[in-house]
């Protein structure tokens, strides 16, 4: 069975008892979380976020520059008033450089992607600082609390990054 077929079966069960169709469009806790797409992070369970509570924006590395469009929409159209950036230990973004992935794509697919930045990083704490600073400095992001954390995939704990 494919993952898609498994998802369809699970969704049938979920939808059979679904009772949250009346949740409002704006997130109840007025917060946006920017985090990594890593499958080991369950944002809801690890942060106590339920359906309707927060916007959760996920991408490779939890990079703010890639999430900026969504953060702006979240604030301007849906009223969020806080941003939390979360990167994590054992992140794949620590394992390669732009040159590495560009070569892999060139060799494997025959495509030149030298114009793309994949936003890898070598220092986990600094990547959080950089992303928080990017959001704080952007004239497109409201002057709201913006904080950064590192999620430890081996313990489930988050630690603030200053």
Image (cartoon, helix red, strand yellow):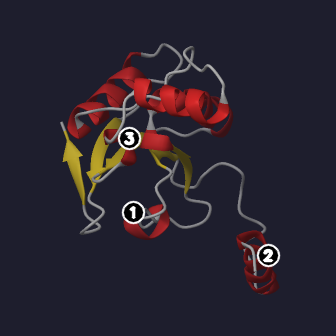
Label 3 to label 2, Cα distance in Å?
30 Å
Q: Are marks 3 and 2 in contact (CB under 8 Å)?
A: no
For residue 11, which quarter of the picture? Answer: bottom right
Q: Are marks 1 and 3 in contact (CB under 8 Å)?
A: no
Q: Secondary structure at mark 1?
A: helix
- For label 2, the residue is 5
Q: N-terminal of the two: label 2 or label 1?
A: 2
For residue 51, which quarter of the picture? Answer: bottom right
Name the residue: 54% across, 17% down. Answer: 140
Image location of residue 33, percent across then percent down: 47, 47
Asked whether residue 67 is in view, the answer is no
- For label 3, the residue is 93
- For label 1, the residue is 47
Query: In the image, is residue 134 above or below residue 28?
Result: above
Query: In the image, is residue 59 above or below residue 127?
Result: below
Between disc 2 and disc 1, the foreground one is: 2
Instruction: Give the quarter of the figure containing the N terminus.
Output: bottom right
- Badge 1, how many Cα within 10 Å: few under 14, some, many 20+? few
Q: Secondary structure at mark 2?
A: helix
Name the residue: 51% across, 34% down. Answer: 104
Asked whether residue 91 is in view, the answer is yes
| Residue closer to the observer: 133 or 114 | 114
């Amino acid at each position: 069975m494919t993952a898609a077929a498994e998802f369809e079966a699970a969704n049938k069960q979920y939808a059979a008892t679904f009772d949250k169709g009346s949740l409002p469009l704006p997130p109840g806790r007025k917060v946006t979380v920017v985090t990594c797409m890593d499958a080991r992070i369950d944002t809801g369970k690890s942060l106590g976020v339920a359906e309707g509570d927060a916007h959760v924006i996920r991408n490779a590395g939890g990079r703010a520059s890639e999430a900026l469009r969504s953060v702006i929409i979240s604030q301007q159209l849906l009223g969020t008033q806080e941003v939390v950036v979360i990167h994590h230990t054992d992140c794949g973004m620590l394992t390669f450089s732009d040159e590495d992935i560009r070569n892999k794509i060139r060799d494997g697919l025959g495509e030149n992607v030298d114009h793309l930045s994949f936003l890898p990083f070598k220092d986990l704490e600094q990547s959080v600082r950089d992303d928080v600073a990017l959001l704080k400095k952007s004239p497109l992001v409201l002057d709201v609390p913006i904080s950064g954390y590192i999620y430890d995939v081996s313990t489930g704990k988050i630690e603030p990054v200053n």
